[in-house]
Amino acid sequence: MPRRVEVRLKVSATAAEVAAAAAELFAETAIAAARSRGVARIAISGGSTPKSMFELLADPSQPYLNDIPWGQLQLFWVDERCVPPDHAESNYGMTKAAMLSKVPLPDANVHRMEGELDPEEAASRYESEIRNTFKLEGAETPAFDLILLGLGPDGHTASLFPHTEGLDEMARICFANHVPQKDTWRITLTWPVIVAGREVAFLIEGAGKEEMVRTVFTGGYDPETYPAQLIRPASGRLTLLLDAPAAAGLPGPPAVGASTLELS
Ligand code: 6PG
């Protein structure tokens, strides 16, 4: 039986406001974690949705450049395409252009998945990088301070695609997942690592995601078909940052604002 989770829903009128809410969550988490543990470890997703958030974090007219303790931030990726870092499809490449090239985050704090390598080698090297950075022992699971996820139109999240081997991987931290429906390989954090995040948040925008948001968060539990349903954080909390079009299918008044949803 899936874990019961309280979903904290924050619906914004526009995609720009979702990006602002996400930037705020990123900054708050980084500041709080650095203050309490001396380090903030955040894992970000790729795709198109988070780009505006990254641009806001790097925008000199916003408070984040000054407020975020960049020297105490360790940045990781949730997943990566198996392409070189300068490839148009690279999640790292997108983040570098939108943010990394404009913020004082030390290179040593940027933990890139090496998409240019053989997928298995890249996954194994990333797992070692996480073990070393978190100083993990044995089968310990890393506890990221924040994991930011997207939702694919097919119900995937990270690079956990429907009916792929990665959905069954419980032991590894990072996995090379073959995605037949895209005829490609992806490197991804596994779902047990994602659900161990202290804070886990989805950023979802656009009317195109309405149906999948409704299915994933209010429909029957079928994670093989809708892998995003695997994300039931051990903390018992999950944050959804949506714009109104993406949230239109959720129960209750399509109100912009904050509310809660119970995932049973
Ligand atoms: C990736 C992402 C992936 C993404 C979803 C949503 O590598 O593409 O990590 O999981 O979050 O596909 O993508 P959009 O934000 O582009 O809709």
Image (cartoon, rainbow, N blue to C red):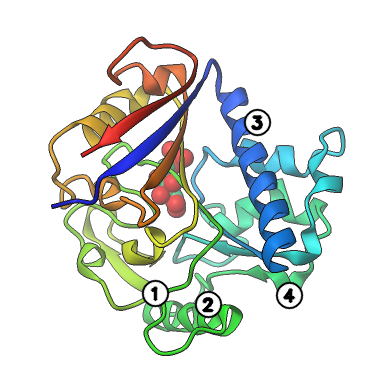
The residue singled out by tag 3 in the image is 20
The residue singled out by tag 4 in the image is 108
CB atoms at circles 2 and 1 under 8 Å apart? yes
In the foreground, 141 or 52: 141
Alpha carbons under labels 3 and 2: distance apart:
28 Å
The residue singled out by tag 1 in the image is 173
The residue tagged with tag 2: helix, strand or loop? helix
Q: Amino acid at mark 2?
A: Ile
Name the spot of residue 24 as percent of width and height, x first.
67, 38
Label 4 vs 2, first from the N-terminus: 4
Name the spot of residue 130 as percent of width and height, x first.
53, 77
Q: Is residue 199 left or right of residue 195?
A: right
Label 2 vs 1, first from the N-terminus: 2
CB atoms at circles 3 and 2 under 8 Å apart? no
Vertical side of 106 occupied by 242: above or below? above
Alpha carbons under labels 1 and 4: distance apart:
21 Å
- Viewer-side label of 1, 4: 1
Write the residue at 29% across / 19% down. 249
How packed mark 3 is, by other alpha carbons closer than 10 Å (few <14, some 14-19, many 20 or more), is: many
Alpha carbons under labels 1 and 3: distance apart:
30 Å
Number of on-image labels: 4
> In the picture, residue 54 is in which quadrant?
top right
Alpha carbons under labels 2 and 1: distance apart:
8 Å
Alpha carbons under labels 4 and 2: distance apart:
13 Å
Q: Is residue 1 left or right of residue 27?
A: left
Write the residue at 35% across / 39% down. 6
The residue singled out by tag 2 in the image is 130
